[in-house]
Image (cartoon, rainbow, N blue to C red):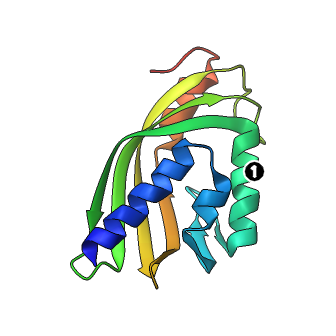
Amino acid sequence: MTDDTAKLIRAYYAAFNADDAAGMLALLTDDVRHDINEGGTETGQAAFRAFLARMDEHYRERAEDVTVMVSGDGTRAAAEFTIHGTYLKTDGDLPAAAGQTYALPVGAFFEIRGGKIARVTNYYNLADWSRQVGAGTAGA
């Protein structure tokens, strides 16, 4: 079961890196819970699809150096990686976008049910991201 979970999480990030929203959604339960970094919680595939569309409008990102860890029973997993991105369009009240690049360490946590991802929780340092893009200069 742990191998299946690891493959599921790797497939999720492969779809993410391929800008394949449909591929990502196919790996999620219908009632997926999405805990947004320093934000709220959204539930369901429709909310996740809308989140991905918002992200695509404002950011171009790629997850690199992904390491996947799985609990002994395969029902929980974590991934650690570096997100490399470009800030394309100003997002709400965040700093103005001017094509700045950034690189951030990210931790992601997952619950697995019935061979699909039932929860996605992401954590990264928003203050670090703001420093990287805030001055309008390229990040790391």
Q: Residue at the spot x=75%, y=50% of the render?
A: 53
Please state, as top left, top right, bottom left or bottom right, where the N terminus lies in the image: bottom left
Instruction: Name the residue that disc number 1 marks.
Output: 53
Q: Does residue 70 appear to the left or right of 137 in the view shown?
A: left
Q: Callout 1, which amino acid?
A: Ala
Please state, as top left, top right, bottom left or bottom right, where the C terminus lies in the image: top left
Q: Nearer the viewer, residue 4 or 67?
A: 4
Q: Is residue 127 above or below residue 5?
A: above
Q: Residue at the spot x=35%, y=70% of the render?
A: 5
Crowding near the residue tagged with mark 1, few <14, some 14–19, many ≥20 C-alpha atoms within 10 Å: few
Q: Is residue 117 above or below residue 127?
A: below
Q: Does residue 74 appear to the left or right of 92 in the view shown?
A: left
Q: Residue at the spot x=69%, y=71% of the render?
A: 45
Q: Nearer the viewer, residue 93 or 20?
A: 20
Q: Residue at the spot x=73%, y=37% of the render?
A: 58
Q: Nearer the viewer, residue 113 or 84?
A: 113
Q: Position of residue 123 (x, y in %)?
A: 46, 54
SS class, disc 1 = helix
